[in-house]
């Protein structure tokens, strides 16, 4: 087997920066008691001002006040850890959160799908960068070795056990995951690297230290299997972004909305699911909430489409009070079936699938403005169709041909002696609701080559009435 460890060294900071409209501005995460506030993490722009992690807030403010302070949120780290596990689930069915701020993925069975390791690694890095998270990647024959090697390397890929033992042997003891007590005891013995520890007789280590040391060394070298709890994706998606300032217009909400819908798309790809509807909650400064419901007629998961849908509905909303935070919640997550596409699509850059066009029109014009059609059990042409909210039209059973364009009101056909192609087809119906009709329908061909559907009223007179145009054939 082969495992990949993805270390996220700035998980908390990246989670804040990716939601910021200006990630290049100086920013610091602050933690501690009210009596002693300390900088937990700072970005590159803040380091240029002289700020650094572990510095007291008082000292930082003495150096500069041109930086943004954000409270360090321990709960947010766990939520983002889970989110990235959901993303990694799209690449491997065995994803583990055994180590904090790190992901373990079994990739041996995934290489056949995603290609050789260099291509697979490039894809992992590309998607993590797009999501806004800095990372280090290491591949190794077992998960424990991959995690420990990631403490000192980035981009390393080891497949040979002998090479693995040589690399681990050069690692310092304080980077091998040993507990502080054991690492200190080994250091007092003059041992600095794993190679020096492995050179000692095994029975002497068993006498001086508890069984945990030998167990850790065995799992590190791949001589003993390690049991991992594998991640299972949740049944719903929920993500909240707190804004750095009060927002009073919908345009200013587009940046966090784009991030939310991109995260939703990544989550859906990991579960191999789509979404049939989600809710956007706007949390106002006065404690009130606004809700934007987005419903779809078929499951989708493309981030661009999801963003366009929520933006179209949001543009029709009047913000009543400044917005302090936005929250997106999706519960209806059915299995996703990709749209069938031809191998050689004509002008794909200008064509939009019907399902996406339909959802965009519904988002901009309203749910009732775009509807399907279904057949109705009535012989009268003007009553044979009804609007329907279903995404799939209910077509009538086989019968005589009907035009694709039916006029709302029949008009006198201004055509002298048209050619009769078919007919008459008599329709007598509607006596029960007062709309009784008696008509003989004909399929006619005009002099210009157009095919029309027209009728004559059936009456007791010998002289037939004029043709009444009721529809056009394509």
Image (cartoon, rainbow, N blue to C red):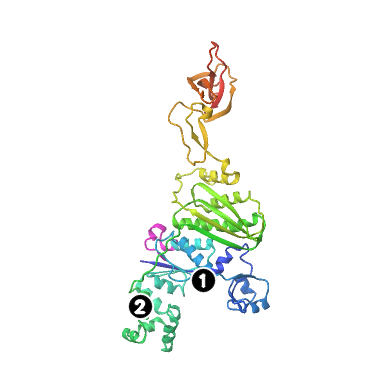
- SS for callout 1: loop
Residue at 49% of width from left, 54% of height from top?
331
Question: How many numbered dots are placed on residues in this image?
Answer: 2
Residue at 48% of width from left, 37% of height from top?
393
- SS for callout 2: helix
Confirm whether residue 19 shows in the render: yes
The percent position of residue 463, horizontal first and vertical second, equals 55, 11
Depth-wise, is mark 2 or mark 1 nearer the camera? Answer: 2
Instruction: Using the image, tell me which numbered label, if any, was put on residue 215.
Output: 2
The residue indicated by pointer 1 is: 9
The percent position of residue 409, horizontal first and vertical second, equals 59, 26
Q: In the image as oriented, which residue stretches furthest toward the left?
A: 203
Give above or below for 443 relative to 19: above
The percent position of residue 311, horizontal first and vertical second, equals 60, 51
Q: CA distance from mark 2 to mark 1?
A: 27 Å
Task: Name the side, left or right, on which 212 lies relative to 7.
Answer: left
The percent position of residue 225, horizontal first and vertical second, equals 34, 71
Quadrant of residue 255 within the rendered picture: bottom right
Residue range in magenta is: 104-119
Residue 267 on the magenta span: no
């Amino acid at each position: 087997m082969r495992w990949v460890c993805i270390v996220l060294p700035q998980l908390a900071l990246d989670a804040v920066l990716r939601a910021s409209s200006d990630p290049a501005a100086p920013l610091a995460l602050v933690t501690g008691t009210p009596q002693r506030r300390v900088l937990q993490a700072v970005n590159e722009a803040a380091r240029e001002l002289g700020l650094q992690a572990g510095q007291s807030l008082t000292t930082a403010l003495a150096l500069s006040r041109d930086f943004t302070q954000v409270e360090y949120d321990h709960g947010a780290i766990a939520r983002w850890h889970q989110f990235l596990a959901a993303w990694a689930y799209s690449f491997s069915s065995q994803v583990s959160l055994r180590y904090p701020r790190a992901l373990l993925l079994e990739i041996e069975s995934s290489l056949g799908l995603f290609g050789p390791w260099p291509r697979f690694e490039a894809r992992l890095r590309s998607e993590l960068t797009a999501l806004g998270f800095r990372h280090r990647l290491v591949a190794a024959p077992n998960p424990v070795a991959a995690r420990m090697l990631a403490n000192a390397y980035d981009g390393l890929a080891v497949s040979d056990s002998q090479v693995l033992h040589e690399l681990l042997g050069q690692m310092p003891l304080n980077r091998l995951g040993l507990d502080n007590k054991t690492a200190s005891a080994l250091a007092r013995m003059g041992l600095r690297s794993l190679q020096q520890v492995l050179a000692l007789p095994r029975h002497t280590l068993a006498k001086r230290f508890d069984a945990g040391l030998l167990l850790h060394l065995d799992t590190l070298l791949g001589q003993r299997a390690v049991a991992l709890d594998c991640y299972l994706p949740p049944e719903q998606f929920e993500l909240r972004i707190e804004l750095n300032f009060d927002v009073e217009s919908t345009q200013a909400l587009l940046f966090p909305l784009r991030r939310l819908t991109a995260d939703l798309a990544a989550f859906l790809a990991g579960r191999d699911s789509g979404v049939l509807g989600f809710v956007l909650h706007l949390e106002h400064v006065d404690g009130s909430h606004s809700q934007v419901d987005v419903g779809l007629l078929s499951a989708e998961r493309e981030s661009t489409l999801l963003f366009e849908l929520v933006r179209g509905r949001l543009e029709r909303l009047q913000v009543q009070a400044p917005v302090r935070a936005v929250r997106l919640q999706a519960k209806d997550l059915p299995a996703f079936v990709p749209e069938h596409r031809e191998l050689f699509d004509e002008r794909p850059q200008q064509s939009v699938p019907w399902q996406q066009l339909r959802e965009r029109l519904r988002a901009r014009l309203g749910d009732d403005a775009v509807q399907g059609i279904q057949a109705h059990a009535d012989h009268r042409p003007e009553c044979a169709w009804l609007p329907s909210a279903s995404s799939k039209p209910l077509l009538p059973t086989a019968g005589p041909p009907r035009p694709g364009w039916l006029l709302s009101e029949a008009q006198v056909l201004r055509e002298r002696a048209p050619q009769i192609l078919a007919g008459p087809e008599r329709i007598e119906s509607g006596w029960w609701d007062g709309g009784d009709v008696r008509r003989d329908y004909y399929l006619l061909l005009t002099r210009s080559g157009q095919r029309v559907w027209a009728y004559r009223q059936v009456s007791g007179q010998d002289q037939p009435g004029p043709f009444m145009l009721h529809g056009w054939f394509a």
